[in-house]
Image (cartoon, helix red, strand yellow):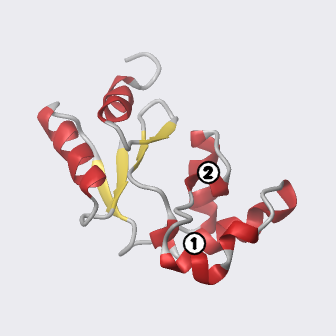
Amino acid sequence: MEIWINPACSKCRSAVQILDEEGAEYTVRRYLEEPPTADELRGVLERLGLEPWDITRTQEAEAKELGLRTWERTEAGRERWIAALAAHPRLIQRPIITADDGSALVGRSEDAVRDALTRTEPGD
């Protein structure tokens, strides 16, 4: 399991605390210091079952500067969104947890984080 966090984010700190309390084995990725590549974002989006605009923090100043609210939310515009997230990782919703079963979720609630803990590899 891996969790993408911004340590300044209270939701991220809460998620890490839950994982620690439950004794989970996980890796922390400070995604502002180690931004995901476009390929990594595509992989996480596939695991999430979401589109890039679904995990974009559109209220951030960078989003407003880029004019994201006016961008197409279509297959044709998908790569533009992914490129923006790769270039501006602050725009990525957090925390993102990649679970052991190959799925992923946005762990903004305690329930979501606990759900990630139940997602184990097949055969476990």
Question: Which residue is at 76% across, 68% downward?
Answer: 71
Outermost residue on the bottom side: it is 65
Question: Which residue is at 47% across, 20% downward?
Answer: 122
Point out which mark residue 54 bears: 2
Question: Which residue is at 81% across, 63% downward?
Answer: 72
For residue 108, side relative to residue 49 (left or right): left
Please tell me which of labels 2 and 1 falls first in the chain.
2
Point out which mark residue 86 bears: 1
Helix, strand or loop under label 2: helix
Question: Which residue is at 29% across, 50% downward?
Answer: 11
For residue 17, side relative to residue 93 (left or right): left
Instruction: Identify the image quadrant of residue 107.
Output: top left
Outermost residue on the left side: it is 21
Could you tell me which quadrant the N terminus lies in?
top left
For residue 11, side relative to residue 94 (left or right): left
- Report if the CB atoms under discs 2 and 1 are less than 8 Å apart: no
Q: How many marks?
A: 2
On screen, 108 above or below 33? above
Image location of residue 85, percent across then percent down:
58, 69
Q: Crowding at label 1, few (<14), some or many (≥20) Cα neighbours within 10 Å?
A: some
Q: Which kind of residue does numbered mark 2 sit on? A: Asp
Residue closer to the observer: 60 or 18: 60
Could you tell me which quadrant the C terminus lies in?
top left
Q: Crowding at label 2, few (<14), some or many (≥20) Cα neighbours within 10 Å?
A: some
